[in-house]
């Protein structure tokens, strides 16, 4: 009789214990669902905010570039009024050309890179083979530098030794300035002989990824000689972190 009573008590205890656990879970669930709903930001709104910020930054950068250009002209004007000899003038002009802060014109080459005519940049993945990427522009400009080309501009953005060419999503930034295809790479050359050397490299075994995608994804890639092209002066800033004053 005692054993039966004990079993009944154990069953009742287990039932109450299980009921307590179930009630506990229900209370936790109710508390969780009773928290105020926090609306997630709309993706379209977030994109619009980012686009607006990018536009503001781009406008600010253009304004700073215009200021730099005006300062460069002011410096050139004041230097013209100084009494310096022909040798010093030539040296100063050479340094400007070397650094890229002087507009330059002459015989050269123009190279066109563009997305496939069927490509829609805003709708495609950032690594889509039919799109022009920052790496393509870097490969091309590095090739030009290897064969001795010094003065290069991309979409009217003069390159310096410190220039950066990067991708941010489907956007291409050159020295933090956003550019869009078609990509027009222009460079001044010494003469027709240097053009032939550049053309041999362009036709040869270099830029294989670009040429492969040209065949398989209709990427646009061609070049031509130009009797006269004009490259703007570099309008960005230079880092002075590692400069040292010399006597």
Image (tube, rainbow, N blue to C red):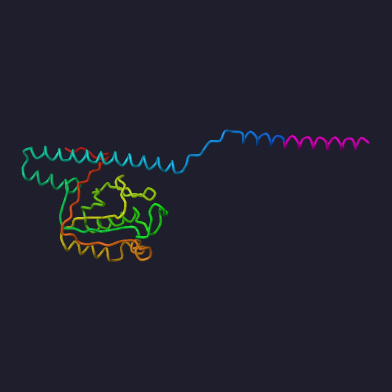
Please tell me whether residue 12 is drawn above or below residue 110 in the rendered image.
above
Give how far across and how far down residue 51 sits, in percent. Answer: 37, 43
Q: Residue at x 9, y 40 (%)?
A: 80
Quick one: which residue is furthest to the right in this view? 1
Q: Residue at x 22, y 46 (%)?
A: 234
Q: Residue at x 34, y 58 (%)?
A: 115
Horizontal side of residue 106 vs 203, given as left or right: left
Q: Residue at x 87, y 37 (%)?
A: 8
Main SS of residues in magenta: helix
State the residue in front, 59 or 126.
59
Please tell me whether residue 169 is drawn above or below residue 76 in the rendered image.
below
Give how far across and how far down residue 134 sits, in percent. Answer: 34, 53
Horizontal side of residue 142 vs 195, given as left or right: right
Q: Picture quarter containing residue 148? A: bottom left
Quadrant of the image containing the N terminus: top right
Q: Picture quarter containing residue 193? A: bottom left
Give how far across and how far down residue 49 sits, in percent. Answer: 40, 40
State the residue in front, 192 or 59.
59
Quadrant of the image containing the C terminus: top left
> Magenta stretch?
1-22
Give how far across and how far down residue 238 sits, in percent. Answer: 25, 42
Horizontal side of residue 121 vs 90, given as left or right: right
State the residue in front, 109 or 138.
109
Q: Specify whether residue 15 is painted magenta.
A: yes
């Amino acid at each position: 009789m005692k054993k039966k009573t004990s079993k009944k008590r154990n069953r009742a205890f287990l039932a109450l214990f299980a009921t307590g656990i179930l009630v506990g879970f229900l209370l936790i669930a109710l508390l969780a669902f009773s928290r105020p709903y926090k609306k997630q930001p709309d993706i379209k709104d977030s994109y619009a905010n980012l686009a607006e910020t990018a536009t503001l930054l781009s406008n600010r950068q253009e304004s700073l570039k215009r200021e730099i250009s005006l300062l460069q002209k002011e410096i050139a004007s004041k230097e013209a009024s100084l009494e310096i000899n022909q040798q010093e003038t030539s040296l100063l002009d050479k340094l400007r050309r070397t650094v890229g802060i002087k507009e330059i014109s002459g015989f050269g080459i123009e190279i066109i890179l563009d997305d496939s005519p069927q490509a829609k940049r805003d709708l495609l993945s950032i690594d889509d083979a039919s799109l022009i990427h920052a790496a393509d522009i870097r490969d091309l400009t590095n090739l030009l530098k290897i064969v001795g080309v010094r003065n290069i501009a991309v979409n009217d953005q003069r390159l310096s030794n410190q220039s950066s060419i990067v991708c941010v999503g489907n956007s291409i930034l050159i020295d933090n300035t956003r550019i869009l295809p078609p990509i027009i790479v222009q460079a001044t050359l010494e003469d027709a002989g240097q053009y032939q050397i550049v053309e041999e490299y362009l036709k040869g075994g270099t830029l294989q990824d670009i040429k492969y995608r040209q065949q398989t994804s209709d990427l646009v890639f061609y070049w031509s000689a130009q009797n006269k092209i004009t490259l703007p002066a570099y309008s960005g800033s230079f880092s002075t972190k590692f400069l040292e004053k010399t006597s």
